[in-house]
Amino acid sequence: MPSLIAKQPKVVREPVTIRLDKEVIDALDSYCRYVDGARDYVITEALSLVFRRDRGFTAWREASVAKPPAKSSAKE
């Protein structure tokens, strides 16, 4: 059965440090073996999937990006 996450392409990534529950790390490592991918790839793909499918987040993000920046009251 095909996995939900495709094989890992070669791309440049920025380092991020996070702390996860032991159970999540174990499941992450298992999934990495299942898709033959690295942790950073699986985490990136999982978050990308959530970001695409969460309609509330998508609407919120579009609304917050569309807002013009607040004008400063300080005179130049």
Image (tube, helix red, strand yellow):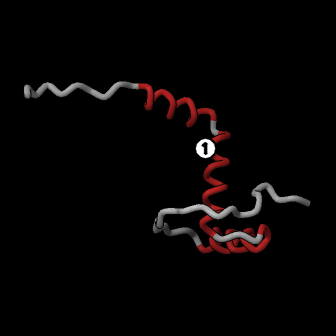
User: Which amino acid is tagged 1?
Assistant: Phe
Which quadrant of the rendered structure holds the C terminus?
A: top left
Residue 21 % position (x, y): 57, 70
Quarter of image, res 71: top left
Quarter of image, res 58: top right
Residue at the image position 66 percent from the left and 55 percent from the top? 46
Looking at the image, residue 15 sits to the left or right of residue 72; the answer is right
Establish if 73 lies above or below 38.
above
Query: How many other residues sit within 10 Å of disc 1, few (<14), some (14-19) or many (≥20)?
Result: some
Residue at the image position 27 percent from the left and 27 percent from the top? 70
| Total numbered circles | 1
Which quadrant of the rendered structure holds the N terminus?
A: bottom right
Which residue is more in the foreground, 15 or 9? 9
Residue at the image position 77 percent from the left and 58 percent from the top? 6
Instruction: Check the image and name the residue furthest to the left.
Output: 75
Which residue is more in the foreground, 62 or 30? 62
Quarter of image, res 53: top right
Residue 59 % position (x, y): 55, 29
Residue 30 % position (x, y): 74, 73
Residue at the image position 65 percent from the left and 41 percent from the top? 52
Establish if 1 lies above or below 26.
above
Q: Secondary structure at mark 1?
A: helix
Q: Which residue is mark 1?
A: 51
Residue 9 % position (x, y): 69, 62
